[in-house]
Image (cartoon, helix red, strand yellow):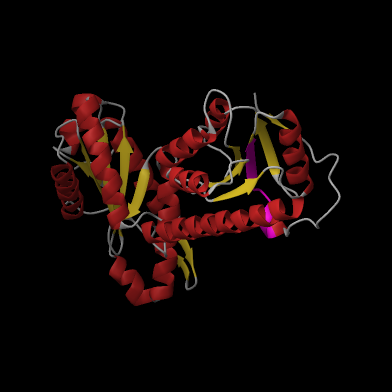
């Protein structure tokens, strides 16, 4: 019932709105009168808006149910199937992610009718037959409000994204990682699928800072984060757990496979020196691994991964350990895993 149209037969009259209000703004025209619908379509297209037209309220609701729904609606009051007021109420009830500006196009200009329209959720109205300059002014006003709200949403998302990521490494912050971790462990418990945690600590990192300086230390941390991302799967999550500690969550990954990921990360750190502002630096890492194969509590999972990490450090560093025990885990599940076991 709805269709998109190119910018043809643009009407003469008022100048087009500024690019800031027209660019990328999608407008829905819902009007059962073909002549009125076509006139609105031509006017809006000529002013630079992306227009979708439908002939009744039911089709309007179908368009507004799409993920990329229009941000501004020109809505006829009297339409078959579903009238304009019902469309207003439905849009206001169902669409909460971003604001939709609604202009009623109506021949009802009495005070009671206008109050009913605003109560239903309309932002403005235009009476039929509409005047082109008045229509343009009201649409531009609505477009400015919609654009401002889009900018506020974008700014909010940028702040949220910034708050979720460590500024030095780009990895998830500890708090953001814990949110994902808690959710995935609950899902693993519900679906009876494994989820694994990999915790790593760069060995003797304080000596790197003391010998090469903190700028070089920052270079090492950034490169270690890059190598971690390159090591794990795209579906995994990686975070900065502490100063030189990193953590990765591997959903639907059993312990044996998580050990392979951990060993791959250990090798990526130790086999190639790090280029820093103070020269090349050799670094190794100790890694601990735990999986919901053996538990389904998020706090317990973190603690056991941390215990495995400290066991790796206690047994000489530059190695991978797992809960309940590296040797038992490997021999009990995969015999092709080779770790640096005593």
Find residue 105 and report its horizontal and vertical position in percent: 62, 42
Residue 342 image point, x, y percent: 19, 43
Q: Is residue 179 above or below residue 201?
A: above
Snapshot quadrant of residue 79: top right
Q: Position of residue 279 (x, y in %)?
A: 49, 70
Q: Residue at x 14, y 39 (%)?
A: 297
Magenta stretch: give its range.
Answer: 20-29
Does 24 lie within the magenta span? yes
How many marks do you count on the picture? 0
Q: Residue at x 28, y 56 (%)?
A: 175
Residue 81 shows up from this direction: yes
> On the image, which quarter does residue 68 sit in?
top right
Quadrant location of the N terminus in the rendered image: top right
Q: Give me the residue at 32% from left, 46% from top.
A: 248
Q: Nearer the viewer, residue 14 or 249?
A: 14
**In this rendering, would 122 be left or right of 213?**
right
Q: Is residue 294 left or right of residue 318?
A: left
């Amino acid at each position: 019932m709805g269709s998109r149209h190119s910018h043809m037969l643009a009407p003469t009259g008022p100048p087009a709105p500024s690019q800031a209000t027209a660019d990328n703004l999608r407008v829905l025209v819902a009007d059962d009168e073909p002549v009125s619908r076509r006139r609105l379509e031509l006017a809006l297209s000529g002013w630079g808006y992306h227009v979708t037209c439908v002939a009744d309220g039911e089709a309007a609701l179908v368009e507004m149910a799409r993920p990329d729904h229009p941000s501004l609606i020109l809505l006829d009051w009297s339409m078959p199937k579903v009238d304009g007021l019902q469309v207003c109420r439905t849009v206001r009830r169902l669409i909460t992610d971003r604001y939709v500006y609604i202009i009623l196009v109506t021949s009802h200009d009495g005070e009671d009718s206008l109050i009913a329209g605003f109560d239903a959720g309309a932002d403005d109205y235009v009476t039929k037959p509409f005047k082109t300059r008045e229509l343009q002014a009201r649409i531009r006003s609505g477009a400015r409000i919609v654009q401002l709200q889009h900018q506020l949403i974008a700014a909010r998302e940028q702040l949220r994204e910034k708050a979720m990521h460590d500024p030095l490494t780009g990895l998830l912050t500890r708090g953001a990682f814990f949110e994902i971790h808690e959710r995935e462990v609950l899902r693993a418990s519900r679906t009876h699928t494994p989820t694994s945690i990999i915790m790593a600590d760069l060995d003797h990192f304080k000596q790197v800072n003391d010998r090469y300086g903190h700028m070089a230390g920052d270079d090492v941390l950034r490169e270690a984060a890059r190598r971690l991302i390159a090591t794990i799967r795209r579906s995994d999550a990686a975070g900065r757990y502490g100063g030189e500690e990193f953590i990765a969550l591997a959903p639907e990954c059993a312990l044996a496979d998580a050990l392979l990921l951990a060993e791959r990360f250990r090798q990526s750190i130790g086999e190639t020196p790090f280029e820093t502002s103070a020269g090349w630096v050799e670094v190794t890492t100790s890694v601990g691994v735990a999986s919901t194969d053996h538990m389904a509590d998020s706090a317990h999972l973190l603690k056991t991964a941390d215990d495995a990490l400290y066991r790796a450090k206690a047994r000489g560093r530059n190695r991978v350990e797992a809960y309940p025990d590296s040797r038992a885990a490997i021999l009990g599940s995969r015999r092709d895993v080779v770790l640096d076991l005593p």
